[in-house]
Image: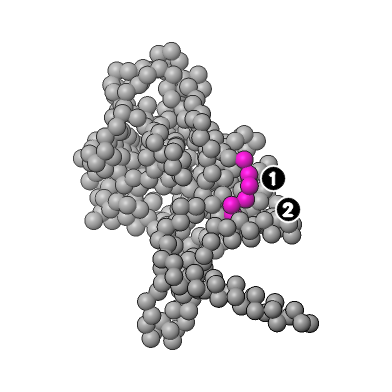
Amino acid sequence: MKRYPWTVVAVFAVIAGISLVSLLKPPVYYSEHERRFLAQKPQWKISDILSGDFTGDYEVYLTDQFPFRDAWISLRTAAERVLGKKESNGVYLADDGYLIERHTREDMDETVFRENIERTARFVKQAEEITGKGKVKIMLIPSADSILTDKLPAFAVGLDQSELMSRVRQALPDQYVDAASILRKHREEEIYYRTDHHWTTLGAWYGYQAWAQETGIPAWPAEAWHVEEPDYDFYGTVYSKVHVKVPPDRIQIYIPAEEISYEVNYNGGERITGSLYAYDKLGTRDGYEVFLNGNQPLVKITRSKGEAAAGAGMQTNDTAGNLLVIKDSYANCMIPFLVNHFNETHVMDLRYLWPDIPAYIRENDITDVLILYQTVRYSNSSLYRLEHGK
């Protein structure tokens, strides 16, 4: 009993110490480990205080700016694992060393999803009036929790992405590319990273096969590629949410077996390079940015005409036309497969760009269009800019 007051004093001392550190340390704007911007101290307003918004915003701010945040995340995950939990911070601690991001119905926005389908249908009709029927395709890529279901904890219940993809396919039957089926066939292979939310280059390779089958364009066979695996330990975005000790991923890079020259033009001349890969990104925290230097507003890739992958018997086609890819980050590692079938490949990320797309199609002699998104992102990110040029 005599030691009890000292226990209370110690607890209050810890709380006071953490509070003091919170007050004195400058706010952190970006978390390298979590790869996101952190909440900043909200400005108080009488209306926000009365509505309760200020309290909620301040709670988020305190959580994001908590001292030694990374260490606490690791400690929390370790404690939950000791208690037998198979999920932490929205991440399944799955079999075979996989950390799989969990998606639920709350991760989608039904109104946005419905509007996106309608906008996509209107855009397809408008684009095909320029390119010709059958020249516009849409591909939705399911996330790992929808494909690697055998690795998930027992009784794991998530978002039914097959239902979402089915609704898009029903609205656009002639344009839809079914990537999910081929991914399910190869789910025993490493088609998703263990520590990141993206598919691997092998997964994108299978997506490329599905696209080629739908478009009637012959896909290059495996022998047309040389696969590089840089000496780089990759820990991705899902790892950053839990900081649990697992083996790192390896990033694979597919290079044509026979040399082909490219010009990669970022954002209208901001940067011009001869490689589809930004190898310097392998020395940074987000190695996935090795593919096309991460997410960029606009990239134009020109393949040198007349070159061929003769050793594999695959001839490039100088009259193949120009491709436009409208995408999120899932497309980045698939684009190196697509570019060899076109003279020019134009890549748009509508999160950072507000173009008049029909005008762009006309001005750049676009002959083919591919809309490629991860399914959950397509369901909750408004594609207003798809049909409303600035």
Q: Is the magenta stretch mostly helix, strand or loop?
A: loop
Which of the 4 image quadrants contains residue 327?
Answer: top left
Q: Position of residue 198 (x, y in %)?
A: 51, 44
Q: Is residue 217 left or right of residue 320?
A: right
- Residue 346 in sight in this render: yes
Q: Quadrant of the C terminus?
A: bottom left
In reply to whether residue 88 is colored magenta, the answer given is no
Write the start and end of the magenta stretch as one range.
242-247
- Residue 367 in sight in this render: no
Amino acid type indicated by mark 1: Asp
Q: In this view, does 387 lie to the left or right of 212?
A: left
Q: Where is residue 244 in the image (x, y as percent from the top left)?
A: 62, 50
Which of the 4 image quadrants contains residue 129?
Answer: top left
Q: Where is residue 76 in the image (x, y as percent from the top left)?
A: 64, 60
- Residue at mark 1 to residue at mark 2: CA–CA distance: 11 Å
Badge 1: residue crowd in 10 Å (few <14, some 14–19, many ≥20): some
State the residue at coordinates (60%, 49%). 100
Q: What element carries label 2?
A: loop
Quickly name the residue at label 2: 154
Q: Which of marks 1 and 2 is nearer the N terminus?
A: 1
Q: Nearer the viewer, mark 1 or mark 2?
A: 1
| In the rendered image, the vertical position of residue 95 relative to residue 339, given as above or below | below
- What's the mark number on residue 95? 1
Amino acid type indicated by mark 2: Ala
